Amino acid sequence: QGGDPTGTGKGGRSIYATPDGKFPDEIVDGLKHSKRGMLAMANSGPNTNRSQFYISYKAQPSLNGKYSVFGHVIDGLEVLDRLEKLPVDAQDRPKQEVKVNKITIHANPMAT
């Protein structure tokens, strides 16, 4: 999970100018947690999206309808392999700081 500028897992605001910094879920029936590398918004309940996101290590059907899927990794899965192998603490957080330094966003990553 990433996208929290405070590093606490509780911070961040969306880019939308809302009073609480949150925006509604954007659940699309055809976008599912169907495979490794799915990219989705993290939230603390319905319609509480802010700036945090996650990339799945495997299919997660139990998350469908609860988190807004908005993309998937189409190249560089070896980086996900390395992330998955990092040592983590008791809260499942990496013991060392991890930063995304470069990404390429395609116009429609969900296109088939």
Image (cartoon, helix red, strand yellow):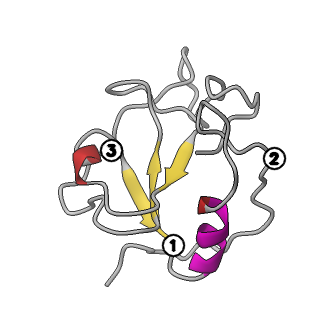
Q: With respect to residue 40, does 106 lie above or below?
A: below
Q: Amino acid at mark 1?
A: Val
Residue 59 picture location, percent across and down:
32, 62
Judge from the rendering whether residue 51 lies leftward or rightward of residue 66; answer left or right: right
Question: Which amino acid, mark 2?
Answer: Gln
Q: CA distance from mark 1 to mark 2?
A: 23 Å
Q: Is residue 78 magenta?
A: yes
Q: Amino acid at mark 3?
A: Glu
Q: Is residue 82 shown above or below 66?
A: below
**Residue at the disc numbered 2:** 96
Magenta stretch, residue numbers: 76-83
**Between marks 3 and 1, how big is the CA–CA gap?**
19 Å
The part of the image, by quadrant, that contains residue 1 is: top right
User: Which circle's residue, 1 or 2, is located before the other in the chain?
Assistant: 1
Q: Residue at x 77, y 68 (%)?
A: 102
- In percent of the image, x 70 and y 45: which residue is there? 94
Q: Residue at x 68, y 35 (%)?
A: 4
Find out whether residue 48 is within the magenta segment: no
> Where is the C terminus found, in terms of image quarters?
bottom left
Name the residue carrying label 3: 26
Identify the image quadrant of residue 12. top right
Which element is circle 1 on?
loop
Q: Which mark is residue 16?
A: none
Q: Residue at x 44, y 32 (%)?
A: 43
For residue 73, the mark is: 1
Secondary structure found at label 3:
loop
